Amino acid sequence: MSEAAQPVILARGLTRRFGDLVAVDQVDLQVPGQRVYGFLGPNGSGKSTTIRMLCGLLTPSEGDIEVLGLRIPAQADELRKHIGYMTQKFSLFEDLTVRENLQFMAALQSVPRARTRARIDTLIEQYHFSDRQKQLAGTLSGGQKQRLALAVAVIHEPQLLFLDEPTSAVDPESRRDFWEKLFELADAGTTLLVSTHYMDEAERCHRLAILDRGRLVGDGTPAQMTAALEGRSFVVTAKDPRRIQHALSGLPGVLSAAQIGASLRVLTDAADGASETSAQAVRERIESTVQGIDADATFKPAEPNLEDVFVAATHDGRSQREMAA
């Protein structure tokens, strides 16, 4: 196994309870090095709780964690020297300047004094703060605060960077620029674990885990996960898509029918698509329903996307839990 493929995070049976609430439930993870690994899931799915346990900030109720070869939480103090952590709240000192924020964090992270000035100068140039280094952090725009928070998180050149929904409060252009910075870090050898609820960001990740209600319901590369849904996605174009959507929503074998403009994106259920015969029956059932409402409507296969993956994974995961119960 190459150095890049060596797992930097291993978690087995990771569980966290808060009273009767099971926030994270028997999660197994293996995160490869020098990659951008994504956590996709809605709010409340357990992403932040999982990250906090992996960082050593929260003790798991059950399970084993190894990060960068260290046992967590027992060796959490040692781990903090080698990781960075950034949240959506951008943990900055707003009454300090850009440079002062970097200086303060360098001191906290024990960056050698002889190296501090050169490191800060590099980050100020790299993150485009040359003309703003004396500006108070509190007066920066959302995108600028995001860039500064990332620079602060990597001041000590961590091997592993945790980012908990870091783009939720910024505009699309800032999000795009931010992701370019993340890939620059990965190219330089940093491993990144990024939680998000944006599908376009999930598509950027080298590998992706899908969390739903504390359970891991999907894990793989975006290409692998979409390929697994081949033959289950369709597009219906019609004059009255709303009427067709209502008709399809209760049809056996239809997992979802979501309106997108003047068309519907239809995803079929894995249970009915288990064989070619049953899959064909589902397709014929959908097409017959569509044509019965609008003879001019079109019904065509579509390439699966990550939204289809997410809908299928969360539905299949919940079905499995209901069967187990």
Image (tube, rainbow, N blue to C red):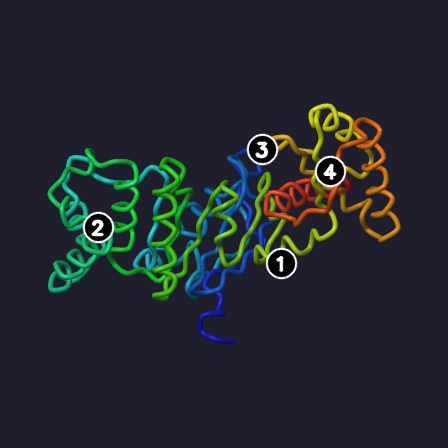
Q: Nearer the viewer, mark 3 or mark 1?
A: 1
Of callouts 2 and 3, the N-terminal one: 3
Q: Are marks 4 and 2 in contact (CB under 8 Å)?
A: no
Q: CA distance from mark 3 to mark 4?
A: 31 Å
Q: What amino acid type is highlighted by mark number 3?
A: Asp
Q: CA distance from mark 3 to mark 1?
A: 35 Å
Local crowd at mark 1 within 10 Å, few (<14), some, or many (≥20)? few
- Residue at figure coordinates x 71%, y 41% from the top left: 267
Q: CA distance from mark 2 to mark 1?
A: 36 Å
Of callouts 3 and 4, the N-terminal one: 3
Q: Are marks 3 and 4 in contact (CB under 8 Å)?
A: no
> Which of the two residues, 113 or 43, is positioned nearer the viewer here?
43
Residue that carries the numbered disc 2 in the rendered image: 128
Residue lying farthest to the bottom in this orientation: 1
Of callouts 3 and 1, the N-terminal one: 3
Q: Nearer the viewer, mark 2 or mark 1?
A: 2
